[in-house]
Image (tube, coloured by chain):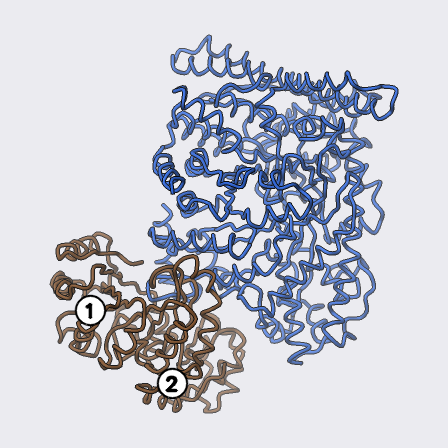
Amino acid sequence: MRAVEKARDWQTQTSVIRATERIRRLRERVARSEPSVCSERAVLVTESYKETEGQPMPIRRAKALDRVLRNMTVFIAPDELIVGNHASKPRSAPVFPEMGVDWLSRELDSILETRSQDRMVVPPKVKEDLRSIIPYWRGKTLREAVYAALPKDVINARLAKVFTLDNHEEGGLGHMLPDYPTVLAKGFNGIVDEVEERIGCLDLTRPDDYEKYIFYEAVKIVCRAACAFAERFADEAQRLAETERDLQRKDELLRIAQVCRRVPAQPAGSFYEAIQACWFVQLIIQIETNGTAISPGRMDQILYPYYARDVKENKLTPEQAQELIDCFWIKLNEIIKLRSEPATHVHAGFPTTQNVTIGGQTEEGIDATNELSFMFLTAQDHIRLSQPQFSLRVHRDTPSALLLRAAEVIRKGGGIPQLISDEVLIPSLLARGIPLETARNYAPIGCVELGVYELWGRGNGGYFNIPKVLELALNDGVDRMTGQQIGKKTGDPRQFTSFDDVMRAFREQMEYCTYLLAIENNVIDKVHAELMPHVFISTVSRGCIEQGKDVTRGGARYNWTGPIGVGIANAGDSLAAIKKVVFEEGKASMAELIEALDHDWENHESLRQLMRHAPKYGNDDDYADLLVKEVVNIFLDSLKRYPTPRGGDQGAAALFSLSVSLPFGWATGATPDGRKAGTPLADGVSPVHGVDIKGPTAVLKSVSKIEHIRTNGTILNIKFHPCALQGERQLQKFCDLIKTYLVDLKGSHVQVNVVSADTLRDAQRHPEQYRDLVIRVTGYSAFFTELSREVQDDIIERTEHMLM
Amino acid sequence: MAVKDSATIAEDAEDANGSQANENQTGVVFNIQRYSVHDGPGIRTVVFLKGCPLRCKWCSNPESQSLHPDIMYNKAACARCGACVQACPTGCIHFTETGVLLDRDLCTKCGTCAAVCLFGGLRVVGRRMTVDDVIREVEKDRVFYDRSGGGLTLSGGEPTLQARFAAGLIEAARDRGLTVAIETCGHQDPETFLSLVERVDLVMYDLKIIDASLHRDATGVPNELILENVRLLAARDVPLTIRIPVIPGFTDSEANIAGIAKFVESLHAVREVELVPYHRFGQHKYEMLGREYLLSDAAGITEERLKQLSCILAAYGLNPVVGG
């Protein structure tokens, strides 16, 4: 009872803290800055690599980072309280030539600035810099090494978009929870001391120990570089303070200097120092690597001891803490990644997926909510930009005040925070051999992939196109879009005489395609271990210093690889339609169906409608739902058997899609669920757009039939019109709905997109994709797309009003 | 689910009173809506029973009024494929420039056209279901009711009109431990009415117009029976809330709201009165039924107006709530 009241108090106290003028200005500045490319890092890394040729790779990588941190531009912008820049401007992306330059030389002159997705400004000087370094890198990059090592069959499947791994073929690794707590407790000086001690215990005549020695020397270099980087900000703050006329700002700058002289070198002594140290770690990782999903994790837990002590000692007010949190929130938005054009379609909109998590349980299994949990929700309410990826861990005893406050933030639009279930994710980690206390301290990495400090999970071990596998099964292994033999020969589908024949072919193609994916995953691991040790990341990953090994070589305590299944709803719905229309009702033959698919349904509209009317996933109908479940299990079963070179297996597969549902759709022919060739696949574990017509409870029940506990995370997006969330009673019911899904039905994740007026306008243009959109008011409900234009316009107007 | 012919439905409706409820009892349902959040406590499934004795001019569910199935035609979805024209046994469907036209005088509402329509252009509203069919659908969301305190809500049309079916649903739900709420206009023979509503956990009772003749003009029936039933109900121990649809030009006068408030206050059994603002979201349904919408010129109700009316209710010691 006391906990409940406390939570309610926190809710009341923290939700009234307004964003300060400073925060508004900082937010505006980052929201308005145009994405651009910065060449500083590329030039510095090239210089360093030229000087270190012949040295051990970990040392070369460490020296390259050292070179950048000591020489790149540092600046402190007006109003900033948390300092540390990624490149020479906010939202300017550094370049990582060591990962790959072919695409860069192709896109540099015109494509980068004109492409349809994630366009970037490239100043002439940057172009010139980059052009001058490209020749040095030819033949030395990660991407070239990966492609040289891949067997031809794998490359073919990869190009046919059966799977894609562009992230790790031409980019660094990420998907991790940096060990902030250790950095805050020991400082990098403390870590260097520990490493020195370990070096003292080595016997360098032993080859293993010599390898460790190299690694430890590299760790020392990056730790010292990190401290030097912070010192540079201290110097800059001091310099600015000397000429600052505004007395308040002068004080602020002197405080910044003080903070940066202490952290991250020494242990954090205050909330301010703690959050600044976290930012330095977050930033430096992203200067070392262009890997995504560097996830701060459970910041309400990590920072709470510092907050509680400062508040108790009257050194900090909640308002001051909120402002610092808001600054951190904005900082996360300054980081963007430069990607090749094909990769921007997979990760559209510069997602860096830096996941911040609140709520959940302590290592002892008790509810972990504290004031900061609420203040992070308030930060999201204040900032509302694309980062961070923000998660609320929900469990049986999550205080309803916390969930209600989250619902308030969600109701205003944007779908943030996403809600994830301890009741599924903790058992799922246990099933993978993680001890209970460690599992309870989990946080999602990137989108939803599960992370603990001790894990190197190679999240994003390939997006995998499941409907494409079904296409191969229904075309004797031939890519329907190109006519090329990609899969195995599993027989002419026109000769299939039972539904079992279809399933057999599907299983065989799945086995073969996951086998190809496993090869590529292991090649990527191997090439990264050789060429691209991630020394700074290893310094802040638990287990690596203990073992004296880089993460890319298995230094983490737990290892696995996590591929990502895409399009389960299309595959399951397609199988349901074949089973029903062809084999149960006999309304069409396999030959007719294949003919229709070959012609992208042209002149087969009636058959297409028949297939579309078959049972569909998302309506709480076992007929389709259980086939989707089976598709998922076939995918998971086939991956489990493959080991990774670091240890562990490749079976930690997640189910989500980001924007890859588009490029995968482009490469996939017509599917038997009635989908036309080249159109997007279903996203995450959500039903195909517009086929779920029984409302959110039916969707949640359908989706819960998948065994979420077997996955490494799933993403379910559901749409709500704001009218369903207006009023406190409705909001409470919404919280009950979510909790039922996450706690009782054991769904792992849900993200609620409150429908905006723009979405409704899109629904007017494409009604077929929005058949599920319901307008609910007392005693009445209707599908939006069936309303007259006039009434639709009226609702759009109301919607704009509701979201204001 | 097959659609029964209209004659059978009429018969069933006629002998709807009195008989013993059982789970094979059938009735005509025009919609089952899961995750309903405006129709009683918690997350509920609303079962809409077809048929209503009233003909309110502002009705947003015109397809609910007749006890018989209706054919609705959605021109926007029609592909003009002609399947319905071919299939119609009475030949009452014809091509037009932009779609098809139903001759509704000839149409027997047999549903053949809807059965062959692949594009969602034609559909039958109202299907015959057994109590067991309905309850099985309702039970699918039990896990949500358990957490939220929700359950089944019977609505319509006027759910007490198919009295035997409604009784079957109420008993079957109670047997399974589900709570039952009912939304009613109250226009029903008192004995039948009380025997039903006494068995539910919450009655949401519509009061529209306090003046008898104005009531008749706007809804087609006088309000004596309605007021009588709510008095009887108030004397029993059944949780009751009152709802007032706020319809410009019909129910939104201060005199009417004050009149209703005074009446409700005199019942000494009700605190919460919900004002349900007018909307015209039902307009398209009239078009789809081939009927004319009578309120096409009506203005909306402003939030300010709702506040003023709430104040009147509060002045009578009632607890006003504005519905969504």
Q: Which residue position holds label 2?
A: B104
Characterize the local packing of mark 1: few (<14), some (14-19) or many (20 or more) Cα atoms within 10 angstroms.
some
- Image coords of residue A636 (percent x, y): 70, 55
Per the rendering, the mark at residue B234 is: 1
Q: Is residue A678 positioned above or below A282 on the image?
A: below
The colour assigned to chain B within the rendered structure? brown
* Mark 2, secondary structure of its residue: loop
Residue at 20% across / 62% down in the picture? B270
- Taking the image as shown, residue A129 lies to the left or right of residue A243, namely right
User: Do discs 2 and 1 share a chain?
Assistant: yes
Residue at 24% across / 74% down in the picture? B186
The amino acid type, in three-letter code, at marker 2 is Arg
Question: How many numbered callouts?
Answer: 2
The amino acid type, in three-letter code, at marker 1 is Ala
Which chain is in blue here? A
Q: Chain of mark 1?
A: B
